[in-house]
Amino acid sequence: MAENYFEVLRSGINTTFQDNGRKNYYHIGIPFSGAMDNRNFVIANAISNNKKNSPVIEFALQGPKLRYKGDKVYFNVTGDVNFQILRKNKIEEGVCYQNLVLENNDCLDLISTNRSVYGYLSINASFKIDFYLDSYSVNTKAEIGANNGKILQKNQIIKIENITKKYSLNKLDYINSKIENIRVIKGPHFDYFSKTAKELFFKEKFRITKLTDRMGIRLDGPKIENIKYTNIKSEGLVKGTIQITADGDPIVMLSDHGTIGGYPKIGVVISADYDKLVQIPPGSKIKFKEINLKDAETIYKLYEMETRNLISKIK
Amino acid sequence: MIKNISNLGDAALYCDFGNDVNREINLNVIQFFKNIKKSNIPGITNITPSYNKLIISFDLSITSFDKIKTEVEQLNFKNEIVNEGNLIKIPVCCDNDFALDIKRLEKLLNLEKEEIYKKFFSKKYYCYMTGFIAGMPFLGDLDGSLHARRLDTPRVKVPKNSIGLTEQFCNIYTFESPGGWNIIGKTPLDIFDNKNNTSPNLINPGDTISFFQISKSEFEKKYG
């Protein structure tokens, strides 16, 4: 066949191309971006036998509906995703974490994520998309990356090339575990807050509000009282930083965050809990738990080892 | 120089150069930023200079806080004078359609708009940092009579290329974005060029900026 492509029948919510993100551009205002849930991104590429940093399609809550045109291609979906494949005259229920096939005119309907936020679609081929500043990752704020820096649009075409002819029934048994406790290292402005506020921060639950996207999570809960300055001279941020706004509400910086900010930093989410944090859907409650740097480093090593183990179990 | 290095989470260093905002401290930060960039320490993924802090992010799967801290402390920097940066001239149109907050400033500063613009255009500004949104420069310092607080309620959408003032600083909104600075005009220049794949930023930390006024017809002809 001359050309292989997806036709976007429904764009889904915040559907973007993402890879590992871009490094070394914070100083000009460009954040990492990249797949929000790195573990599910890495697993998707491993099941596809793709290179580690190949771009995938990331979607949030509701995924896209795509019609496929072209030669037979294999794909897999990771995350906790409810999806179907519509073939000639039958509907097949999708199973995550395994290679499945799409043939000419088949339709892939990524209906929704279950009690989670992000899902990933990887193909045993490559998307024909543009690279900008060392990455394919779409950053909609700076309008950079693949797809002219935009989310997927209804009726657009996604061209596909380099289809792998060899099929391997790669499969992984994996269930995404959910967490409620998010471990946090105290930030440089921890002592800007009252004794009661510091206790409340690690004792009470906070609700993830709908004002949550790839840039950040806005939380709702007890007000965190600032006894020093509610604004600081703007300074750099990293993903996972928890700032307290002048109103006393925590906001957590995520992968597309503004690179500098002027609110005091009460803490930073540990690297090992980041993938799980971003998957907690709006409306859920979370609790912060204090942890020290050494323990956070050990937990990260374990988390990485666990990811490597999962990849070695793909067969 | 650096007064203290602490950790920001488990994957970044927080280098503190003090609490004051001035050119001298900021030049130190920028110098440090450039030197670390040159040193190519393995595992560093981002370096973010700001007024008086430098944040160094690293890949926790390759290195750790203690390792990077030691390496940063051991770097033997020569006390070279920092390159003063480029002088960049930015045209600004102050038509009422673009100067969204000029009336508010007249009241707040107790100055006629002609005086506000005269004072604004007569100074050169230093770029302390760029960021928040891609390419946005934080410039200073404004004449003491132009210091105004932010809007009480930030705008949901500040138009792209607007020039804003707050306290001793001014900036350029490189993209349409939420924001609370007092808007006094608009430039036809793209400060962040997202088609440029090598150096998309027109203004970098350490540069000097001079603004000059253009008419609406010049603006419409995409001045320059």
Image: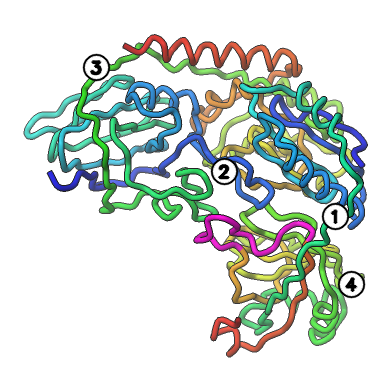
| Quarter of the image where one finds residue B185 | bottom right
Vertical order, B57 against A2 (above or below) = above
Label 1: which residue? B82
Seen at 83% across and 84% down, the residue is B118
Closer to the eye: label 2 or 3: 3
Q: Label 2 is found on which chain of the structure?
A: A
Marks 4, 3 in one chain = no
Left or right position of B131 against B197: right
Q: Residue furthest left?
A: A89
* x then y, percent, for residue B151: 74, 63
Q: Earlier in the sequence, mark 1 or mark 4?
A: 1
Is disc 1 in contact with disc 4, using a CB cutoff of under 8 Å? no
- Tell me where the magenta segment starts and ends, as one range: B192-206
Q: Nearer the viewer, residue A10 or A298?
A: A298
Closer mark to the observer between disc 1 and disc 2: 1
Report the residue marked by disc 2: A256
Chain of the residue displaying label 3 = A
Residue annotated with mark 4: B143
Residues at discs 2 and 3 in contact (Cβ within 8 Å): no
Q: Work out whether mark 2 precedes mark 3 in sequence or the reverse, and give the earlier one.
A: 3
Considering the numbered disc 3 on the image, is that residue within a helix, a strand or a loop?
loop
Residue type for callout 1: Val
Cα distance, mark 4 to mark 3?
Answer: 68 Å
Q: Which coloring applies here?
A: rainbow
For the N terminus of chain B, the image quarter is: top right
